[in-house]
Image: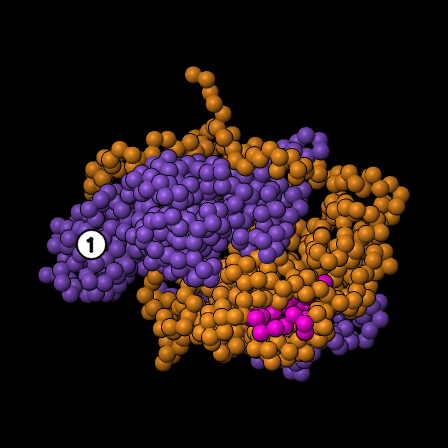
């Protein structure tokens, strides 16, 4: 496929047609004409702008054609573990694009914002109901930014409580990479705790590590092995007795909606990835939205502004002095909040059926596959599960995932969590039918068979995509990160 | 509404296969479990949902916007939304598996190229959340690269951006100062600045480099880059900014499009995803995410940024926007914004306001209203459906024009202002 820079046509969007909007009685060119910026001093004006020249029909065809090289949930099964690739209801796209939501300037007067503020207020209320937390910030742009916010707030809280000695964060070895990376960004040291033979946090090692210098325990529940933490209440209790806070990485909230509340498990903070659990589209890698929920004693540290209700009117509150500040321009990814709000309203008080069906689908798929692949922890799973393909040799998870493409499926997450060798992490979500799960399991079984009979064939896959296996090593050795214009000899 | 395809019969069959009686049997281990339904409203049908949400959206009141301050009202060609709504773009995820994601990667490579051309830099990433957090990431990058802990911020930075920078710096233990010294990791300057001024930053850039600091230019109204000298040409080591002006609706503040572009020597320090061109086993050109060893999922506690999900779809939208506009279109947006702003400035001056920008400005400018009148001006404008600017206090207003402000609205702006102060 050509790059957009390699066309040479007429470009067709000329904004000068804006003048059709103006009153026709006067000659606008004459009025505005003397204000063209050619008179700016030397050094301020650009000398060249080598943008492509492409007509609108070609642009539309170009991007439609390259979209065909992509795979999405709309095309088929996308069991990318830890990412909750569920169906994205189309109505939410239309709702987010309603004029009143989409075309509102963020610095409009409060009287002009009442609809958006009400939506944010009610979304916060619903998220409180779902998690049991006492207050939410909708400002973070993604889960990782909400984590950063949570850790910053933890730091600010202990500073104010005169407990600056709390400089460490406990994180299990199964955690997402963002957890330790976030800790480091805020200059905390990470203590890594191994998992036990049942896939839980090793409680003895946890107890030993839990000293008075530990500020926070960051847990994912269910964890990244797709297993509910069996000792969660004991862990929370130990942490709290030590004066340590409990943080829930809510990436796996899709297993808990309406079944349990993270606050009841003892968590003091939780982030939710609205693009996972609440079905805002992943967009090829964002935008997401990563709300942060906290217990009352942390509420005053939340970023500003907060939406409050005063005499039936919604207003922004900027007054809280303990607040850690602002983590993102204005109020967050509002467009994603609209979609998540709509999703929650669609489900309403039946929302637990999301998690129940997600758990059912995952356990069913696990039951179909457990004789063909190694199951490192032999337990019922939550909304996802991890298999190991190590019996097929080194790099087998990668080969299997590439071969799955030929069967028409997006591969699962592989090589994560790091503690399982040749890990294959499968999250089917609740929006898949039994038929799809059976087909996917059959494909994996076929590949397992192929691996025994003709391993080299599997290793050469995929064969049916638009492109063969890509050389990632060459990409690093000879970086080519942008197009450059060809140099024409004069 | 629900979105569950499984029939009751299928469910029973699945439970039998697993060997349990009910889903509850699968979650015995989970403590504590809720005994009742959550206290949420009853489920809504699609029709009910659309009606309720339309009603809610209409509680907002749209205005004729003469305000920018970080969010700009530009025209978006229709094709942008049509293309990004394609399920292939909309419902994929991060291109971890390049053979399944050549569409996203192809667009990302084009996006990186556009950002490099516009900023005059060597390497761009695939996007960051928004301009404000991109600026904060650039400060952290500088600190980690230089091993220095002080951030110099030139005056004229958008106050919202300053707040975000301050929050990140506090978290990371960095200090913000206005003193250049041997602990200065970077010098940050916005251009055009918050007040619309187009700055000649050559001198500041030289000063930054003399002290061994990196020079960061922040661009929040990127249509300006269509006519202004690219920051790479006046010494920027890092250019960060906001791409919302390129085809994204104002959306009450998000989702927007953060970008970061650097000179070659910094490219392995850049946070977030980067797309690179390579070949497949048959020698065909293709794209992959590259230099992932920088990222949190590999480096964990040694990573300098925790960013994962960014705003890929917004980057695709901007790529499509820029392709539709081309050079002629983008320059016409910039010139139209520029000329309308200057025209309005002159008209307001002629009715008794004072223009405060002493330097050339782009599409935002400060007007000083007569003592005690600016609040009334803004409120009378609001009464006529016009958001007349950002209130800077002390009767100063920060006013913005784009190609979306027709002459007849500019004329009413001026006459309402005139009526208010006379």
**Is residue B276 left or right of A22 when viewed as pictured?**
right
**Chain in purple?**
B
Compared across the picture, whether A461 is left or right of B378 comes to right
Tell me what residue is drawn at x 72 percent, y 72 percent. Answer: A204
What residue sits right under mark 1 in the picture? Answer: B367
**Front position in the image: A168 or B414:** A168
**Seen from this angle, which residue lies furthest left?**
B422
Residue at horizontal 32 percent and vertical 42 percent from the top? B207
Residue A323 image offset from top left, x and y in percent: 42, 70
Residue depicted at 57% across the width and 32% down the height: A2
Residue at image coords 75%, 77%: B28
Chain letter corresponding to the colour orange: A
Horizontal side of residue A195 vs A125, given as left or right = right
Left of B406 or right of it: where is B350?
left
Q: Which residues are magenta?
A: A206-226
Element type at mark 1: strand
> What number of labels is visible?
1
Residue A198 appears in which quarter of the rendering?
Answer: bottom right
Asked whether A208 falls inside the magenta stretch, the response is: yes
């Amino acid at each position: 496929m050509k790059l957009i820079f390699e066309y040479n046509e007429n470009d067709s969007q000329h904004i000068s047609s804006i003048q059709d909007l103006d009153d026709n009685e006067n000659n606008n060119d004459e009025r505005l004409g003397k204000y063209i910026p050619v008179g700016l001093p030397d050094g301020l004006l650009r000398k060249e702008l080598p943008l492509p020249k492409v007509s609108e029909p070609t642009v539309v065809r170009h991007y439609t054609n390259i979209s065909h090289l992509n795979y999405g949930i709309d095309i088929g099964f996308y069991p990318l573990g830890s990412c909750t690739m569920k169906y994205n209801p189309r109505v939410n796209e239309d709702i987010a694009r309603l004029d009143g939501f989409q075309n509102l300037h963020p610095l409009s007067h409060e009287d002009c914002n009442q609809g958006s503020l009400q939506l944010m207020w009610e979304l916060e209320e619903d998220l409180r109901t779902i998690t049991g937390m006492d207050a939410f910030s909708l400002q973070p742009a993604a889960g990782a930014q909400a984590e950063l916010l949570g850790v910053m707030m933890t730091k600010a809280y202990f500073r104010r409580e005169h407990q600056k000695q709390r400089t460490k964060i406990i994180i299990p070895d199964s955690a997402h990479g963002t957890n330790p990376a976030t800790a480091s960004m805020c200059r905390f040291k990470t203590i890594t705790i191994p998992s036990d033979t049942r896939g839980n946090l090793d409680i003895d090692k946890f107890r030993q590590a839990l000293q008075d210098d530990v500020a926070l325990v960051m847990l994912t529940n269910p964890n990244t092995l797709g297993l509910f933490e069996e000792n969660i209440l004991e862990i929370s209790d130990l942490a709290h007795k030590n004066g340590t806070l409990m943080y829930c990485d809510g990436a796996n909230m899709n297993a808990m909606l309406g079944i349990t509340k993270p606050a009841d498990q003892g968590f003091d903070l939780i982030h939710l990835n609205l693009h996972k659990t609440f079905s805002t589209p992943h967009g090829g890698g964002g935008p997401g939205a990563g709300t942060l929920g906290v217990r009352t004693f942390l509420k005053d540290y939340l970023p500003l502004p907060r939406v409050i209700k005063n005499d039936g009117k919604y207003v922004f509150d900027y007054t809280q002095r303990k607040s850690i500040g602002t983590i993102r321009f204005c109020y967050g990814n509002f467009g994603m909040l609209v979609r998540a709000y709509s999703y929650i309203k669609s489900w309403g008080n039946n929302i637990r059926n999301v998690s129940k069906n997600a758990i059912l689908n995952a356990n069913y798929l696990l039951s179909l596959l457990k004789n063909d692949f190694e199951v490192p922890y032999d337990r019922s799973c939550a909304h996802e599960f991890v298999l190991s393909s190590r019996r097929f040799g080194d790099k087998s998870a990668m080969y299997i995932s590439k071969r799955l493409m030929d069967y028409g499926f997006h591969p699962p997450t592989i090589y994560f969590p790091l503690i399982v060798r040749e890990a294959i992490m499968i999250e089917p979500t609740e929006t898949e039918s039994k038929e799809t799960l059976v087909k996917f399991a059959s494909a994996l079984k076929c590949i397992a068979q192929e691996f025994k009979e003709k391993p080299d064939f599997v290793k050469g896959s995929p064969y049916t995509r638009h492109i063969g296996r890509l050389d990632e090593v060459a990409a690093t050795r000879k970086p080519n990160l942008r197009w450059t214009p060809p140099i024409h000899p004069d | 509404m629900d979105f569950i395809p499984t029939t009751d019969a299928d469910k029973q069959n699945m439970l039998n296969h697993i060997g349990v009686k009910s889903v509850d049997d699968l979650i015995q281990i989970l403590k504590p479990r809720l005994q009742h339904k959550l206290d949420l409203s009853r489920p809504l049908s699609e029709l009910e949902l659309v009606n309720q949400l339309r009603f809610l959206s209409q509680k907002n009141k749209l205005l004729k916007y003469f305000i920018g301050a970080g969010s700009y009202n530009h025209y978006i060609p229709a094709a942008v939304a049509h293309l990004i709504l394609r399920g292939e773009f909309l419902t994929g995820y991060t291109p971890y598996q390049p053979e399944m994601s050549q569409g996203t990667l192809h667009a990302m490579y084009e996006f990186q190229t556009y950002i490099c051309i516009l900023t005059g830099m060597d390497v761009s990433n695939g996007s960051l959340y928004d301009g404000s957090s991109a600026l904060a990431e650039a400060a952290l990058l500088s600190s980690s690269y230089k091993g220095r802990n002080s951030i110099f911020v030139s005056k004229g930075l958008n106050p919202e951006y300053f707040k975000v920078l301050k929050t990140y710096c506090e978290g990371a233990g960095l200090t913000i100062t206005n003193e250049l010294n041997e602990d200065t990791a970077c010098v940050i300057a916005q251009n055009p600045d918050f007040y619309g001024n187009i700055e000649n930053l050559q001198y500041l850039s030289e000063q930054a480099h003399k002290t061994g600091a990196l020079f960061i230019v922040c661009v929040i109204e990127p249509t300006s880059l269509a006519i202004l000298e690219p920051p790479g040409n006046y010494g920027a080591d890092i250019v960060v900014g906001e791409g919302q002006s390129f085809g994204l609706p104002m959306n009450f503040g998000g989702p927007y499009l953060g970008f970061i572009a650097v000179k070659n020597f910094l490219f392995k320090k850049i946070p977030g995803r980067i797309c690179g061109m390579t070949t497949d086993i048959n020698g065909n050109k293709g794209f992959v995410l590259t230099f992932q060893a920088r990222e949190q999922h590999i480096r964990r506690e040694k990573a300098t940024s925790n960013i994962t999900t960014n705003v890929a779809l917004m980057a695709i939208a901007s790529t499509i926007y820029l392709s539709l506009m081309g050079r002629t279109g983008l320059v016409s947006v910039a010139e139209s914004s520029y000329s309308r702003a200057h025209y309005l400035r002159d008209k307001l001056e002629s009715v008794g306001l004072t223009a405060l920008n002493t330097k050339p400005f782009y599409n935002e400018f400060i007007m000083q209203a007569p003592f005690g009148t600016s609040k009334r001006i803004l409120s009378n404008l609001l009464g006529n459906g016009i958001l007349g600017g950002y209130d800077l206090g002390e009767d100063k207003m920060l006013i913005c024009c784009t190609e979306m402000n027709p002459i007849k609205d500019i004329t009413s702006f001026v006459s309402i202002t005139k009526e208010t102060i006379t």
